[in-house]
Amino acid sequence: MRTYDVKCPICGKINRGLFLEETEGWMECDQCGNATRIRLAGENQLSMVYTVKRLEPHLKYC
């Protein structure tokens, strides 16, 4: 199975050696802990589609 190195769209940390095919594109950032979904578009292409796991604290101030 192939591994991927992906930059977190929230904090910018490079997360290395991720098995995105096994997790259907989901990853959790090692630094900030946010869950992110990466859509595997092609052989060597990644498209960012992300959902922030820690959204609830931000909604309290809206």
Image: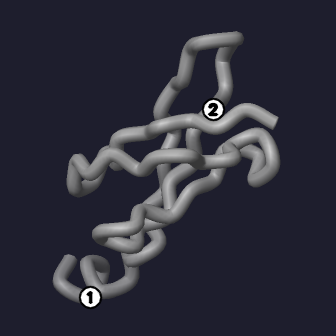
Residue 26 location (% of width, % of height): 63, 53
Residue at image mark 2: 39
Give the alpha-carbon distance from disc 1 to disc 2, as whole Å. Answer: 29 Å
Residue 29 location (% of width, % of height): 42, 62
Residue 17 location (% of width, % of height): 56, 46
For the residue carrying disc 1, how many other residues have a C-alpha within 10 Å: few (<14), some (14-19), or many (20+)?
A: few
Identify the residue at horizontal 47%, vertical 37% (top origin): 5
In the image, 48: left or right of 39? left
Question: Residue 20 appears in which quarter of the rendering?
Answer: top right
Question: Residue 54 appears in which quarter of the rendering?
Answer: bottom left
Identify the residue at horizontal 63%, vertical 32% (top origin): 39
Query: Is 54 or 42 nearer to us in this picture?
Result: 42
Identify the residue at horizontal 69%, vertical 11% (top origin): 43
Amino acid type at circle 1 is: Lys
Secondary structure under badge 2?
strand
Amino acid type at circle 2 is: Arg
Residue at image mark 1: 60
Residue 18 location (% of width, % of height): 59, 48
Q: Is residue 20 above or below residue 61?
A: above
- Mark in front: 1 vs 2: 2
Q: The C terminus is located in which quarter?
A: bottom left
